Image (spheres, helix red, strand yellow):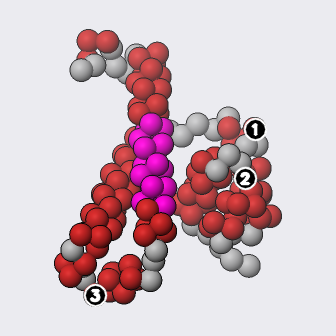
Amino acid sequence: MQTYSEERVAEALAALVRNGNNLKGTARELGVPVPTLRYWRDQASTPSTRLEPFKKEEREVRWDRIGGLFVEYLEANLRTGIVISRFATDPASIPDANHTWLEKQTAEGLGTLYGIMSDKARLLGQSMEHAALERQRLQLEAGVITTDSQE
């Protein structure tokens, strides 16, 4: 039986949400069996898991980690766009390893790849912004921050 890290389960559940709870499509995208993904989804939504909030320190660490992953994703997205753009305008500037793969792709395929990546980055950015605002609202309600301490 295959075991999965907590990070992998979290990534799969995030992908499931991003894909509109499409179990089959998400499982196929991630290479995870549908029953496994269904189990993770069901476990994540049981009352016992919903009622146990993270400790404050854990929330802060997770928030920082998610922010770091988001920045890393955006950087990779931008590097991919730069490589595709350079390949279109100056193929000789692309390292051989990337050049071989890029030569096998169609212009339509590369455009679709970068379009999807850009769209996902935009949606993730909006989600991060929403999460930051919600986090700030909760901190205000809890008295952790005041309106004077906001910039």
Residue at point 28%, 65% (across, down):
85
Q: Earlier in the sequence, mark 3 or mark 1?
A: 1
Q: Main secondary structure of the magenta part?
A: helix
Look at the numbered disc 3 and give the secondary structure of its residue: helix
Discs 2/1, front: 2
Horizontally, residue 89 falls left or right of residue 117, namely: left
Q: Earlier in the sequence, mark 3 or mark 2?
A: 2
- Spatial distance from mark 3 to mark 1, Cα to Cα? 52 Å
What amino acid is at disc 3?
A: Asp
The residue nearer to you, when weighing 2 against 110, is 110
Discs 3/2, front: 3
Horizontally, residue 127 falls left or right of residue 43, namely: left
Look at the numbered disc 2 and give the secondary structure of its residue: loop
- Spatial distance from mark 3 to mark 2, Cα to Cα? 38 Å
- Is residue 12 visible in the rendered image? The answer is yes
**Residue 133 rendering spot, x and y as whole percentages:** 42, 26
What amino acid is at disc 1?
A: Pro
- Which residue is labeled 1 in the image? 47
Q: Residues within 10 Å of mark 1 (few under 14, many from 20)?
A: few
Q: Residue 4: within the magenta?
A: no
The quarter of the rendered structure image containing the C terminus is: top left
Residue 96: give its label.
3
Residue 22: give its label.
2
Q: Residues within 10 Å of mark 3 (few under 14, many from 20)?
A: few
**Residue 65 rendering spot, x and y as whole percentages:** 39, 51
Residues drawn in magenta:
112-128
The quarter of the rendered structure image containing the N terminus is: bottom right
